[in-house]
Amino acid sequence: MIKLKTAANSDNMSQNKYWQSFAEANDPENFKGRNQDEFREELPFEDFDGKGLIDAKAPRRDFLKYLGFSTAAATLAASCKVPVRKAIPFANKPENIVPGEVKYYATTYIQDGDVVPVLARVRDGRPILIEGNDLSFVKGCTTARIQASVLDLYDKNRVTHPKHKKGNEFTEIPTFEALDKELGAAIRNAGGEVVLLTGTINSPSALQVIADFKAAYPSFRHVQYDAVSHSAMLLANEASFGSRAIPSYKFENARKVVVSFGADFLGTWLSPVEFSHGFALNRRINEDDPKMVRHFQFESFLSMTGANADYRFNHRPSETGAVVAALAAALGVPGVSAPAITDAKLKAGIEQVAKELNAGKGESLVVSDSNDVNVQVLINAINSHIGSYGTTIDWSAPVKYRQGIDKDLADLVAAMQSGSVGTLMIYGANPVYTWPEAKKFEDALKRVKVSISFNDRIDETTALCQYIVPSNHYLESWGDAEARAGQIGFVQPTIFPLFKTRQWQESLLVWAGKNELFEDYFRNFWIARLGSADAYNKALQDGVWTAAEATTASAGSFNGGAVAGAVAAIGAAPKGGAKEVVLYQNVALGSGSHPGNPWLQELPDPITKATWDNYAMISASTADELKIDYKSNDYEYYPNKPVIKIKAGNLEVELPILVVPGMDKNTIAVALGYGRAASLGPVYENVGKNVYPVSSFNGTTVSLYATNATVERAGRNEKIAQTQIHTSYEDRVDVVRETSLASFIKDKHEIKDYRDKLVNDYAKNTGSFRKEATLYGDHEAPGIKWGMSIDMNACFGCGACVIACHAENNVPVVGKREVLRYHDMHWLRIDRYYVSDEKDPNELKGVVFQPMMCQHCDNAPCENVCPVAATNHSSEGINQMAYNRCIGTRYCANNCPYKVRRFNWADYTGADSFKNNQDQELVGKLDIAVHHMNDDLTRMVLNPDVTVRSRGVMEKCTFCVQRLQAAKLDAKKAGEPLKDKHVRLACSSACAADAIVFGNVNDKDSAINEERRKNPLRTFYVLEQIHTLPNISYLAKIRNTDELIPRKGAHGGGGHEEGGHGEEKGHGEAPHAEQGHGEKEHQESKLPSTQPAEAHH
Amino acid sequence: MIPCKPTLQRLTLLFLSIFVLSAVTVSAQDGKTLFVSKCQSCHAPDMKTGSTGPALGGVEDRWPDKQKLHEWIRNNKALIASGYPYAVEISKYSPTAMDLFTNITDPEIDAILKYINDVNTGVIGGKKTEKDSENGKESNQNAVIFGVISLILALIAFILMYVNSNLKKLSDDAEGIDRPEPVPFYRNKVYLALFAIVLFIVGGFFVSKGMIGLNRQTGYAPKQPIYYSHKVHAGINQINCLYCHGNAWESKTAAIPSVNVCMNCHKTIQTYSKGPKLYDNEGMEINGTAEIAKLYEYAGFDPKKPDAWDPSKAKPIEWVKIHNLPDHVYFNHSQHIRVGNVQCQTCHGDITGMDVVHQASELSMGWCVNCHRQTKVNFNYSDSTGNQFYSIYQKFHDDIKSGKMDSVSVKDIGGLECQKCHY
């Protein structure tokens, strides 16, 4: 359905247009010309002596010299002498360790209050990958950040031993005994209050430790503070329900309507793992009875969740309250009067939402990420009005993910300022970086006599503390976390602590005078609770424990008393200025709690596909105001982007811009989590800017936006490394298949017709498109044939699969400079397509995400062109890649229509025969991030079953062949036929929405077979018409809108297309959702007549 | 001008004879190749000691009927089922049933039997057959002899030609025919060209052979921190390989046993006295008891106070790794020994006869692939011998039934594909 070059032949068709960049949408001809080269750069020959190789002096002799040298060097490097290798066994082999075999240990990912039970894949004592725990309440789901957390363990910027500040330098404290002695005296001598400042702590055992500590230090106080807080929800719930807690949101029960006011619930809001899973359940389609939840998003910029919405409406951040109030009024929530909404589209949208919410009572859900108590009170009122409580919102088990109250920190700062705080201990919080009034905190910290940080890196706050007592990484720790009342995730160590670190709980125990290892304390705590050591061991083994069977959902008792006040406060809120700035968390870095993670830094943003940076997302109209010619090919083609100067809140910052469709006109969006301190490691210096100072504290809560901002051009450019702009499908059609639910119901056979037409056109004699439509022979798969199906309705673009692939397959990190040269190495990318009306590309209808990796074609264009047969086909349908055979011609990448092959342009992994081959003048020096990844410590994360590729070879998705081989071996060892249970790919098991299904197509009972069998009408293959015969099928994306999209004439068959035009012209534009139903019916009746639909009945 | 035609003819003859000679040596080894690929995994190659299967020396004399012996080798199950008394008798030798070789031809069986007889009577190799490396040495010696002979012949040919041309010159002088001064051989372009071509071919052969052999270390037998004799342990004392290398059953690596496994036995076996004398590679005699004492040092064990031993104080032994595969090769022991029923000896050679372990096989890709080509997969999943896993290969089962295929070998189920071993 992708069709870009359509301006001339479709003037009156209102078909959807799919595009990736403005230049592609506005100037496709030039764009195509620019992008047609697979490898854009010139070969770096001119560096030989400033001239080309041919013009250089005596090139032949030089050539011979180089040839001679390299031959001799290669011989030396290969060296006839084989090094003596040692094989060192255990002195005493532990019974349950089998060298070379993988073991899974259940543990729980804990970060900033997030609780996700996971399995750590441990190989020879090293955790190398995180997978979901199927026993857990999150159903085996993970996110990109969880997947990447294993790399944090091996970060060489971790604090390796306890430290004490002497002057301006930290010096090592040799032993914990010495530390405890010194600190014990210091805390007592400091007098005053002893305060523990943490992120959300939801660990029952840790809270017990804190209680014990309080018993020893009566002047003790525990303050919880979240960088991106949910204080407003907690406070609003206190007002509405009398309980300072957050109820469980059950997206799986919201079958009718989900309305989100800015909440990125699929990416970063509260518990995206659970929400993605639950939401996806209602986004899947049963083809016989197509129904799905309708998702409305009101927001100020294009968020990832917004990109997945069926209808999006933009508003300024300062208008959030008014929009929510308008919806409440439209729904008839008592005591709410409608504020004036000027924007016509927004107004119509609110009315539509109100209508649908009223129709979908009890099966709908409204959420908001606003940190304004008044807005959250109104959201509660709306949810109560539409009957969400007890159905889609459950008060019987409140979640404990976020408990920080912003005002508590403000009070603490005041107390510190007054000098009443003698000792401040910090764990998991970094207010110097995240607090809006960071300077105030900094000054107040200086007045605290003893300041101790338990953080494992020298972050901005830790750098200002006097003591660092580094805590363990979660993979080295004991512990627990309570996701919601009675649901516990258990943490057990999967590796002995790498450095001289100690869990913060143990430090507190020691300083409280209890000389007990936390491990023992923890065991005793849980044996007492669970009744027996066996129950405790079982809980550890499972990684999860649930108190009792879940009770029936509770509605709580809603008290609307606060509504009137909230409406009044919202009405009195100041209007925004010319421009507003909104801060958001992206799926990779979030609030900035994984700063030292190159995988996350290199994960392309779901929307902008930018890596290693934050930037200002601006709307097209803002770009026009700033005189930025974003439609020109130069803007897209060159990574240099204009820099603007933003003044907002307490911050004046210069950031490069990216023009994004679907933004509110006057809002600028910037991601949090960038611009970190140099002490976190040289890799992250100069990566983006810190924009937390834009936020403000209003006396109750922190607002992550600024209403009165000014912007101007800074007069210079900066490079942004984006990954999507350099692949091109060469104007081929049918890459993405997407339609609206209304169109699908009306015309279910569109995709199948297209596929049948291929058979009719190219395989008339036998009816086998596979065999007849090619000159090449077929590959037989006598035993197993691997296949994958990706449901684009369930892919939200979050990137968990990309990071899982990184970790499983040793995919190298290349650094910003290499991404800028289009040398990114991700085997799996998620293509983002903007969907717009063909005639109005700036009016965004939606966004389609399409995971794209090697399609494992059965008639693969890459295989035919490899001169050394390094890439060839297996009898199981895998397009194989033999790295050691590859000589790096790159013909395969050139001939791959999907552009999924990745070439090792430089020695990213340090695997070359030549040592230190990474800083060559000819290929350009590599970023420090690459060297960081090649550190001996960081390399512990490598998967030993996967070859580390060296410079000059091609690589790509292998279908995790190492896992397939292991799966077959497991089945053979068990003496049973291969079944789904044996196979799990890194990407499919990482996906929270289960969008990726993988298995043996030859097995009739496999899930992949069922997926394809149940969805014959949505199944399509990318570029099927060029007869590559991919082994990856996709299920077309359906957006739940009422819009009727006319059927595309079958491409390649002019007749149908012609007919289609004739039909359309008489009726003008196809109707939009907002238009009357009557006209739609009229239109629909005409549409199918152009298609040979009868052929299928 | 020297006539070059005869020279060329002679050279051609020389090359031809060398090729023919080498071809003959290959065909003479058929019996051995067959034995190694089909029999050696269960039958000891010295033909004199029992192994999984009985010693094969004198097998033809033991069998009453040569025809029945052939039948037995081809399909021992059928013969046992037929009730042939000698077959029933020897089927009791071991609980492990002999593999079926339904495709083996009579001449092949004869070649194997001849080889068995030759080895048994000492015609081939004598004692030396035990060590492949010495076989190699022998063929190397042959090559040297051939080379020297060829060189001498070439020299004689050259001298004769030179004499011939001198005589011709003399006779021409005598007859008064005026010929130009002959070009000396070192400036003769024909000679130089020939020399260059020969140098290129011979040099190229050795260079490429050398390159291919880089990093291959057949016969590698390094000195280990402790002189550990597999012959004493696995050969004479018949300790099962998996007792120490149990990891091979579970995992990709066979793993070297940890010190506590050694100590399971050596807590009580403190001296080496009854076994044969031990020699290292240089022929020096080894004191076995002293070697056991080295183990005690690692284990922190005092033989005088065995009860005071604390295993947690043990230090690991740094063995020198003999069998090294390149990093880009994935090899899984459990796949081969557990699923494929391959004997350890197939790749590691006659390990039960080695005092000092050496690398018996080449461990090259060609060597791996060759075995994958020849090895049959047991597809009889309907009885208990086969693996249910292979039931998914419906096409092959159909083909076997319809007679299109007689058996399935590893290559048919993808054993030659790149990503079976490289990923």
Image (cartoon, grey):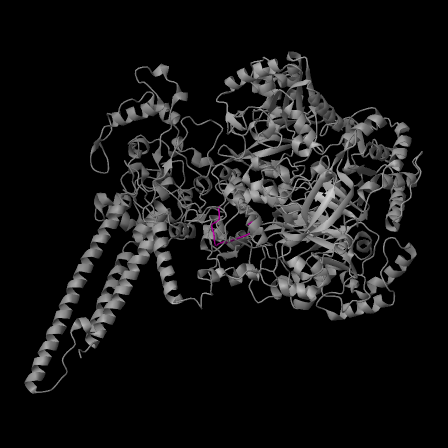
| Residue A386 showing in the rendered view | no
A67 is higher (above) or lower (below) than A684 = below
Report if residue A1028 is visible in the image. yes
Residue A166 within the segment the image draws in magenta = no
Q: Is residue A250 left or right of residue B233?
A: right
Q: Quadrant of residue A991?
A: top right
Left or right of A303 on screen, residue B149: left
- Rendered location of residue A666, percent (x, y): 79, 48
The answer to whether residue A434 is left or right of residue A65 is right
Residue A40 quadrant: bottom right
Q: Does the magenta-highlighted stretch encompass residue A951?
A: yes
Residue range of the region highlighted in magenta in the rendering? A947-958
What is the magenta segment's predominant secondary structure?
loop
Which x, y percent locates residue B77?
A: 42, 44
Of residue A715 and residue A972, the one placed in the foreground of this image is A715
Residue A338, percent from left and from top: 92, 40
